[in-house]
Image: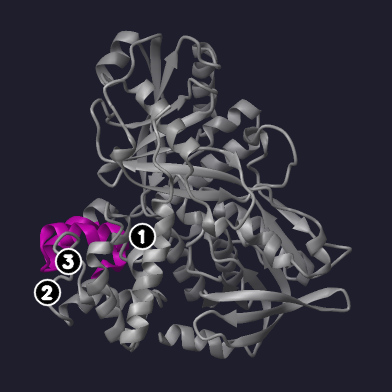
């Protein structure tokens, strides 16, 4: 067991100012902001950091161009401001990405409306570091994007947003920032019951998922930020009678480069229903999607269905006629549930994407629930939430996170740091580049452990070594095989989902964590079960 986990477990006997239930990007952001303001904080998650909705997004850091259609200028401005902060505060993880928005005759939005939207997008991002948009006529668009369908093509706009290839790593680094600020961080720890005394939440019963031990945690205030599981956290309490979450399901397909594939990301209207869809370059492959369907059930079991597969493939093949994508083209799929507010009727696309801080008074005091939230705006959401917690606790310290960065931010910039690390690390060039891409300025600490460990790579395809596995466990709170493969080393996002390295990585984990043969086999079986949701759909003809 890691020393960090041991220390967090020992701290559970103390009273915290704030208990944060949910260790996705928003819960971790709240823990970081609160700890940095001087509050004593415990953040828990029943799974791993960023292992839920934060891992299943489109991995975009964007200003919310589609929110202009809803005339939500405040949300667009907030998103653009936070996009700029992430480009500065986590440049090793968040990078600019050009997008093309094609104009087609018959689109729900006329090309003049789309061009006006581009101008407004630039105006709202007046303080940005990214280039202004450019518009092109039909001929220039066809030259830039020769794979596009020419039928009804009128032109395009090219603009910039940003991408976080490894959203999981973003969450891990926010956790590290929270921990460095003094927060107690405990993953694989489930809130099983809110503790209530005289109408006030005073903490929670917390079950250690690894051992089954139950701890009674006391806190002066609690924030429920469990995303699509938020209603489950409230179950059994006076706040559990009101439904907060009405999540919608979003599915993405991962495919190899295909004939006509664009050089940049595409943001376009589906022909069948006018919904926005994207084709995004990602890790040398393409991420295409997503859907927006109402979902009920356990968010942890959400997976692609045949209708979603048919829809995404058909719309992508319409946009790129030479693509010829079929189900055999799919490397894997992934699906997440957006933690949107419950709205019983209407178009899911009309449900607000703003975050809501739900005050449970008068039913329960000492409790807030967060509804909504996005990768891009986690820092602002956290500031708003901790401002409210501070008011309720009589603590008036102001947020400082806007002036801070994440732990892996290279002081000299990511490109300069990567070149310097490649010269000094003594590692093969490809491996050196991968480490700086995943760990940023912390890559040197990984290299030190690699140098002190078994010299052979665990897998030639990825270059992952035993020292990197040790780093994930000793420094980054990985305690399961899935933690290491899927959310630390990131080889779980390779086309084989990390299965080729599974046995070797499991052996390295066993050596580090003291697993016996039975536990090692259990961990491998659990990882195989985890991977089912990446490929869990019934084959059928493309619509």
The answer for how far apart the CA atoms under marks 1 and 2 are is 29 Å
Q: Residues within 10 Å of mark 3 (few under 14, many from 20)?
A: some
Left or right: 523 in relation to 470? right
Q: Residues within 10 Å of mark 2 (few under 14, many from 20)?
A: few
Q: Which residue is mark 3?
A: 459
Q: Which residue is mark 2?
A: 456
The answer for how far apart the CA atoms under marks 2 and 3 are is 9 Å
Viewer-proximal residue, 402 or 285? 285
Q: Which residue is mark 1?
A: 409
Residue 494 horizontal/vertical position (percent): 28, 54
Decide which of tag 3 and tag 1 comes sooner along the chain.
1
Residue 343 horizontal/vertical position (percent): 74, 42
Nearer mark to the viewer, of 3 and 1: 3
Left or right: 18 in relation to 403? right
Examine the structure image and report whether residue 412 is included in the region drawn in magenta. no
Quarter location, residue 214: bottom right
Left or right: 147 in relation to 275? left
The answer for how far apart the CA atoms under marks 3 and 1 are is 28 Å
Quarter location, residue 433: bottom left
Residue 42 visible at all: no
Disc 1 is placed on an element classified as loop
Look at the image and give the residue range highlighted in magenta.
Answer: 417-444
Left or right: 32 in relation to 346? left
Dot 2 and dot 3 residues touching (CB under 8 Å): no
Examine the structure image and report whether residue 437 is included in the region drawn in magenta. yes
């Amino acid at each position: 067991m890691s020393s960090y986990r041991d220390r967090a477990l020992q701290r559970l006997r103390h009273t915290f100012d704030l208990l944060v239930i949910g260790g996705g990007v928003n819960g971790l952001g709240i823990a970081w902001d609160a700890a940095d303001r001087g509050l004593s904080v415990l953040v828990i998650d029943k799974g791993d950091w960023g292992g839920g909705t934060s891992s299943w997004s489109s991995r975009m850091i964007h200003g919310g161009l589609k929110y202009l259609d809803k005339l939500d200028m405040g949300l667009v401005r907030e998103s653009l401001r936070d996009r700029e902060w992430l480009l500065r505060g986590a440049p090793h993880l968040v990078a600019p990405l050009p997008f093309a928005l094609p104009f087609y005759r018959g689109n729900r939005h006329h090309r003049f409306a789309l061009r006006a939207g581009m101008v407004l997008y630039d105006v709202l991002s007046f303080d940005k570091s990214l280039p202004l948009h450019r518009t092109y006529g039909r001929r220039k668009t066809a030259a830039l994007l020769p794979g596009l369908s020419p039928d009804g093509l009128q032109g395009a706009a090219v603009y910039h947003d940003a991408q976080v290839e490894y959203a999981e790593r973003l969450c891990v680094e926010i956790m590290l920032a929270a921990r460095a600020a003094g927060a107690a961080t405990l993953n694989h720890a489930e809130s099983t019951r809110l503790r209530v005394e005289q109408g006030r939440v005073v903490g929670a019963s917390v079950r250690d998922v690894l051992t089954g031990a139950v701890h009674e945690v006391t806190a002066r205030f609690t924030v429920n930020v469990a995303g699509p599981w938020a209603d489950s956290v409230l179950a059994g309490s006076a706040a559990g009678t009101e439904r907060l979450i009405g999540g919608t399901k979003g599915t993405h397909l991962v495919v190899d480069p295909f004939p006509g594939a664009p050089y940049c990301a595409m943001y376009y209207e589906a022909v069948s229903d006018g919904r926005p869809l994207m084709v995004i370059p990602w890790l040398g492959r393409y991420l295409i999607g997503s859907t927006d369907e109402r979902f009920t059930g356990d968010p942890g079991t959400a997976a692609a269905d045949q209708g979603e597969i048919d829809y995404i493939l058909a719309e992508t093949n319409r946009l790129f006629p030479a693509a010829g994508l079929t189900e055999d083209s799919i490397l894997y799929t992934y699906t997440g549930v957006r933690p949107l507010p419950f709205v019983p009727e209407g178009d899911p696309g009309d449900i607000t994407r703003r975050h809501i801080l739900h005050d449970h008074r008068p039913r329960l005091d000492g409790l807030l629930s967060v509804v909504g939230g996005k990768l891009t705006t986690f820092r602002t959401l956290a500031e708003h939430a901790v401002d409210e917690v501070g008011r309720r606790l009589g603590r008036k310290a102001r947020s400082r996170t806007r002036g801070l960065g994440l732990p892996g931010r290279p002081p000299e910039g990511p490109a300069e740091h990567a070149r310097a690390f490649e010269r000094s690390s003594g590692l093969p060039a490809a491996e050196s580049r991968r480490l700086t891409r995943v760990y940023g300025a912390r890559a040197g600490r990984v290299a030190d452990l690699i140098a002190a460990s078994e010299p052979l790579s665990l897998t030639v395809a990825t270059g992952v070594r035993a020292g990197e596995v040790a780093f994930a466990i000793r420094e980054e709170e990985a305690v399961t095989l899935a933690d290491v493969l899927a959310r630390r080393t990131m080889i779980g996002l390779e086309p084989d989902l990390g299965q080729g390295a599974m046995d070797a990585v499991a052996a390295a984990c066993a050596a580090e964590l003291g697993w016996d043969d039975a536990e090692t086999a259990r961990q491998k079986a659990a990882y195989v079960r985890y991977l089912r949701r990446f490929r869990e759909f019934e084959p059928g003809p493309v619509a």
